[in-house]
């Protein structure tokens, strides 16, 4: 065996392994953020565009790589004399200009057409305001006739709940830095820019959960800034809206949850809002996150246990078994299953307890006061409140009832 | 044994020593003169030693090889300005330490530039015996650095000078001057393009005259100062200008705003009625939803005949004034604009609207129509 053959064999195995890895990575089954598996009309428009574009681009890549490879191998330096150099081949140059131009025009026409279709807002059936901040997403549903009718504003976070089959328009903005909203199975990305309102259409074919994450680097915990879009059938969405607007129910007097409520008012309500909660003097407690947090907002916890995630959807409120069961629920039964919320049996108290014990240890948030000089002492995330285990028990008991 | 040059310095040294002795004895009150003369003597001894060592750089008439090897047989290198520039930089450092940090930094930059230039020039002069080659090699190294920097500095100076001229001229004359200069540049460029045989010297001279003219006028304008720019008062509720009355700020209000896209809402006054156009929401609305603690940009368009302003009422909030929590109405407004005029307002409600006893609204003084603001 010659030295060259040995050298080629040494390279062949790693190259084949790498190629196999690349090909097999496309076969991942559990890929909730797979943009190649559209689950809605808008994502399907993108998919219908990207499939032929990728095929054309792939074909061009193969042709160019083959020609370059052939030339490199065929005309490699073997000590031969340099051939006569020539300049200018008008016919070839014109052809090599016109062919790529035609390819680009061929790709450009359907691309522009798709862009216009994705930017359409005149057929909106439901509007949701989406606001990004370090490092979570807030969703507020304005009063509207759409979405089956919403009579008072609704605020939630972490999980965007939408009616299946309806054309939902997200009005996206940001409170601090630029973020980017992306639910790959439902549509492309849209930047959330402070002071600007940008729109993004979403439409889910079937009830279910669709995962996404922030795709614009936005600081320390960018990787923890996730989101989930939850699609419910029409009746399920109506129930969800009614539940979100239902009056506040205080815990039974003397219960652990009641003690948790008092603790919530003293410790948490400076930033976190629970609609309808009353202070010791009987007046509504209004949180003022703008005084303590740089972005000026923190998640509203009124109906915490109706959603299945917390901390910017970085962690699940449900245990892994319950989560798997929910995600795998068939579309027909999904809405009813989701509307059950997080039951005490399904609540992952370990995660929630760790969060309440020391939030910055679970999700980096510049919580050290020494690092808050640039923000005028305001936090960017939840600090360690130094709660005792007894206080955490009471808070969890109270929060478990927020459904 | 002693060369002519060294003899001269020996004599001068002796004179300095004698002078120092006489001055020291006769003028015992003042030591400064003695110190000066002794210093001069030391310097002269040093120079005498150098002359003695190099034999006055004389070449012996019998040394024929010296005709090509002696330094005197070589073409003298051109005079260098960099030592002088470096000296200027050094002199600027103490000035900068007294006057301001900017001058110190400028001095440091001058010294660094002079050092690099001086080193490269010194090196290039020794690169070969051919002075033309030496000059070319210096250009090859330094021109890629010098030309862009000098070009940028020159351009910056011309732009800065032009800006001073524009600030000095009255607003109307500024537009004319700008058009005139642009026309001259266009005409000059067109002539050059049409007549390609124009000599470089002619082009260079014209450009120089133009540049010197602009810089000269710029310096004059900078010294004379800018024209008086009238600052208009900004309306605010605290000054009681959010009502139906119109002040100076309203008379001078801009009628057009550039910000037209991606707004939270556009509020239109038409036929005495307000309605809101919201991106993504179909149809005109009388209720808008604004995010809490978010800057929301609101555009106000007046389609009615009279001058009107938009007023935002966001309830009453506690504000820290001199350490005391004081309840202050959260009200702000635009300037008043006439028919087809537009203004914009930035709102950042910090409390939910349900926390207020009065609704959050947008209204126009004198017009019986409101837009309700919901803050979730």
Image (cartoon, coloured by chain):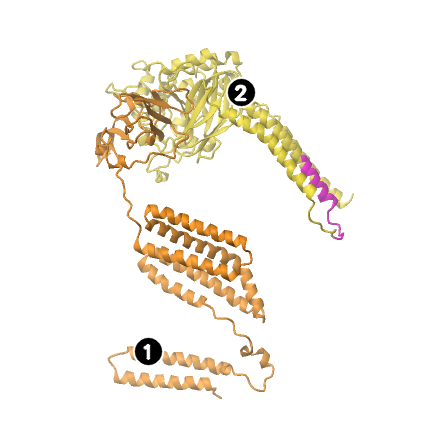
Chain colours: A yellow, B orange
Prevalent SS, magenta region: helix
Q: Are marks 2 and 1 in contact (CB under 8 Å)?
A: no
Provide the chain ID for the residue under circle 1: B
Q: Magenta span covers which residues?
A: A62-81
Quarter occupied by residue B313: top left
Q: Is residue B79 magenta?
A: no
Q: Nearer the viewer, residue B6 or A189?
A: A189
Give me the residue at 58% from left, 31% from top: A108
Mark identifier at residue B36: 1
In the image, A381: left or right of B197? left
Q: Is residue A77 magenta?
A: yes
In the picture, the quarter occupied by the C terminus of chain B is top left
Residue B76 in view here: yes
Q: Which residue is mark 2?
A: A41
In the image, A241: left or right of A258? right
Residues indicated by labels 2 and 1 sit on the same polypeptide chain:
no
Secondary structure of the residue carrying tag 2 is: helix
Q: In this rendering, is residue A326 above or below B105?
A: above
Q: Estimate the x, y position of residue B296 in percent, counting from the top left.
A: 36, 29
Q: In this rendering, is residue B195 above or below A322?
A: below
């Amino acid at each position: 065996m010659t030295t060259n053959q040995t050298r080629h064999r040494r390279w062949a195995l790693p190259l084949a392994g790498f190629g196999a890895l690349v090909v097999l990575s496309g076969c991942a089954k559990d890929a909730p953020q797979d943009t190649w598996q559209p689950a809605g009309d808008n994502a399907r428009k993108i998919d219908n565009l990207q499939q032929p574009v990728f095929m054309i681009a792939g074909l061009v890549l193969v042709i160019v790589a083959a020609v370059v490879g052939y030339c490199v191998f065929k005309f490699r330096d073997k000590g031969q004399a340099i051939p006569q150099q020539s300049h200018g081949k008008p016919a070839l140059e014109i052809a090599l200009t016109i062919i790529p131009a035609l390819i680009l025009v061929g790709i450009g026409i359907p691309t522009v057409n798709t862009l216009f279709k994705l930017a359409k807002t005149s057929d909106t059936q439901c509007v949701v305001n989406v606001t990004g901040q370090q490092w979570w997403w807030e969703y507020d549903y304005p009063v509207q006739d759409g979405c089956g009718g919403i009579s008072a504003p609704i605020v939630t976070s972490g999980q965007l709940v939408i009616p299946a089959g309806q054309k939902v328009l997200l009005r996206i903005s940001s409170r601090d830095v630029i973020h980017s909203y992306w639910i790959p199975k439902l549509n492309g990305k849209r930047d959330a820019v402070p002071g600007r309102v940008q729109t993004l259409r979403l439409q889910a074919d079937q009830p279910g959960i669709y995962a996404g994450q922030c795709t614009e680097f936005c600081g320390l915990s960018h990787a923890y800034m996730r989101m989930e879009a939850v699609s419910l059938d029409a009746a399920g969405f109506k129930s969800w809206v009614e539940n979100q607007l239902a009056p506040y129910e205080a815990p039974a007097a003397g219960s652990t949850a009641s003690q948790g409520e008092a603790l919530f008012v003293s410790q948490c309500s400076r930033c976190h809002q629970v609609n309808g909660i009353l202070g010791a003097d009987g007046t509504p407690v209004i949180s003022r996150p703008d005084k303590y947090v740089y972005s000026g907002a923190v998640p509203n916890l009124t109906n915490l246990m109706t959603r299945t995630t917390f901390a910017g959807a970085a962690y699940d409120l449900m245990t892994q078994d319950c989560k798997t069961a929910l995600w795998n629920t068939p579309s027909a039964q999904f809405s009813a299953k989701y509307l059950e919320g997080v039951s005490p049996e399904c609540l992952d108290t370990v995660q929630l307890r760790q969060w309440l014990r020391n939030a910055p240890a679970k999700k980096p948030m510049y919580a050290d006061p020494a690092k808050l000089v640039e923000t005028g002492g305001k936090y960017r995330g939840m600090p360690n409140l130094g709660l005792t285990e007894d206080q955490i028990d009471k808070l969890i008991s109270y929060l478990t009832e927020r459904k | 044994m002693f060369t002519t040059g060294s003899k001269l310095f020996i004599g001068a040294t002796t004179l300095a020593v004698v002078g120092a002795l006489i001055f020291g004895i006769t003028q015992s009150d003042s030591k400064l003169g003695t110190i000066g003369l002794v210093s001069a003597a030391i310097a002269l001894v040093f120079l005498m030693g150098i002359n003695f060592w190099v034999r006055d750089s004389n070449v012996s008439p019998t040394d024929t090889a010296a005709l090509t090897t002696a330094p005197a047989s070589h073409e003298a290198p051109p005079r260098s300005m960099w030592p002088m520039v470096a000296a200027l930089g050094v002199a600027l450092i103490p000035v900068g330490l007294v006057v301001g940090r900017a001058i110190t930094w400028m001095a440091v930059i001058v010294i660094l530039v002079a050092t690099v230039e001086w080193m490269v020039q010194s090196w290039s002069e020794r690169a070969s015996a051919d002075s033309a080659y030496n000059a070319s090699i210096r250009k090859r190294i330094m021109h890629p650095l010098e030309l862009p920097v000098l070009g940028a500095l020159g351009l910056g100076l011309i732009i800065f000078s032009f800006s001073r001229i524009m600030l000095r001229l009255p607003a109307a004359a500024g537009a004319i001057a700008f058009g005139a200069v642009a026309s001259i540049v266009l005409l000059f460029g067109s002539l050059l393009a049409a007549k390609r045989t124009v000599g470089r010297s002619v082009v260079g001279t014209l450009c120089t005259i133009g540049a010197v003219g602009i810089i000269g006028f710029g310096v004059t304008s900078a010294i004379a100062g800018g024209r008086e720019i009238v600052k208009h008062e900004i309306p605010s509720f605290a000054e009681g200008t959010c009502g139906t009355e119109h002040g100076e700020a309203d008379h001078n209000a801009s009628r057009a705003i550039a910000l037209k896209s991606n707004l939270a809402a556009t509020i239109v006054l038409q036929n005495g009625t307000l309605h809101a156009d919201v991106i993504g929401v179909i149809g005109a609305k009388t209720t808008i939803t604004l995010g809490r603690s978010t800057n929301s940009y609101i555009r106000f368009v007046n389609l009615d005949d009279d001058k009107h302003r938009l007023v935002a009422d966001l309830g009453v909030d506690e504000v820290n004034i001199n350490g005391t929590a004081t309840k202050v109405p959260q009200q702000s407004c635009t300037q008043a604009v006439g028919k087809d005029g537009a203004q914009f307002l930035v709102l950042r409600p910090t409390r939910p609207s349900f926390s207020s006893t009065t609704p959050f609204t947008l209204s126009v003084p004198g017009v019986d129509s409101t837009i309700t603001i919901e803050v979730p």
